[in-house]
Image: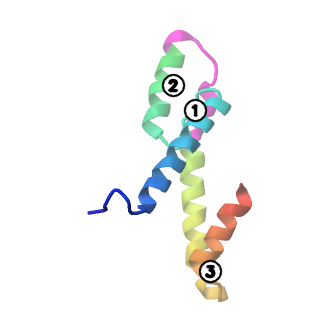
Amino acid sequence: MVEPHETDPSHLAELHGGFVDTAGYLALQGLFTAHVTGNFVTIGAALVFGTSGIIAKLLALPVFCAVIISTRLIDYSLPRIGLPVLPTMLACSWACW
């Protein structure tokens, strides 16, 4: 159990995830960047109320799957070319910001 005065890195991950979700939702006009279920709910609401953004929400799942597959393929290929996986993936993540 983590004592209240100790640093728990999961709190930083929770804060980061919440910030990214909120910023993405606001910047992308209601598109949940990390929640497929949320996108399905907002697609239903957009269809019922006739609001915009349905195409972006429909494309979110295939794009998410494509990114996961490509990231996994890169992850498998890095050791074959002699690069460490974790530092290389972290560098790529930071480069995307």
Q: Position of residue 20 (x, y in %)?
A: 58, 44
- Residue at mark 2: 43
Name the amino acid, label 3: Leu
Read off the magenta span. Answer: 48-60
Q: Are marks 1 and 3 in contact (CB under 8 Å)?
A: no
Rounded to the nearest whole Å, what is the CA distance between mark 2 and mark 3? 37 Å
Q: Earlier in the sequence, mark 2 or mark 3?
A: 2
- Residue at mark 3: 78
Q: Residue at x 39, y 63 (%)?
A: 6
Q: Position of residue 60 (x, y in %)?
A: 58, 40
Q: Position of residue 83 (x, y in %)?
A: 65, 84
Q: Quick one: SS at disc 3?
A: loop
Question: Within 10 Å of the Cα at label 1, are there few (<14), some (14-19), or many (20+) other Cα atoms?
Answer: many
Q: Quadrant of residue 29?
A: top right
Q: For the N terminus, which image quadrant?
A: bottom left
Q: Residue at x 62, y 30 (%)?
A: 26
- Residue at mark 1: 57
| Residue 35 disc label | none
